Image: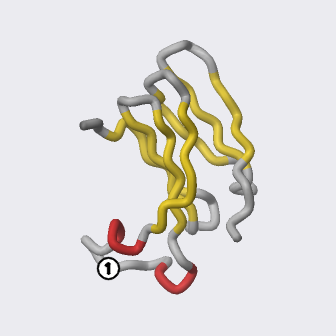
Amino acid sequence: AYSINAVCWSPDGRTIATSDTDGNVRIYELPAEDLFPKAGELTKKLKFWFHVETKQIVRSLAFDASGEALAYAGSQGEVVVYNIPAID
């Protein structure tokens, strides 16, 4: 089992990134028609997109202004910028 360390929304509100104690960054898409889900319904609406295995505990996440890149910082003391592929 793992626990989530950080959560970050993209600037357009359609993408959510999470990090966990197993060293994974997971990216989820929120479909455009569901941008404003009711309380308690968010996790039902998210669609898993892809994940990055970082091999470290990621403690913080941030999207750039365009939402095309995600920066993360973790237990190894470095900041990594990852380019996010376009949603198909």
Which quadrant is the N terminus positioned in?
top left
Q: Pointer 1: what residue?
A: 38
Q: Which residue is drawn at 62% across and 17% down?
A: 78
Give the vertical position of 74 relative to 28 (above or below): above
- In the drawing, does residue 7 fall left or right of residue 65? left
Which quadrant is the C terminus positioned in?
bottom right
Give the vertical position of 37 relative to 83 (above or below): below
Farthest top residue in view: 76
Pointer 1: residues within 10 angstroms few (<14), some, or many (20+)? few
The image position of residue 33, as x and y in percent, is: 52, 86
Q: Which amino acid does label 1 sit on?
A: Lys
Q: Is mark 1 on a helix, strand or loop?
A: loop
- In the drawing, does residue 21 fall left or right of residue 51? left
Which of the 4 quarters of the picture holds residue 59? top left
Give the vertical position of 15 relative to 23 (above or below): below
Q: Which residue is drawn at 64% across and 24% down?
A: 79
The image position of residue 38, as x and y in percent, is: 32, 79
The image position of residue 47, as x and y in percent, is: 47, 67
Which sits in the foreground, 75 or 63? Answer: 75
- In the drawing, does residue 68 fall left or right of residue 73? right
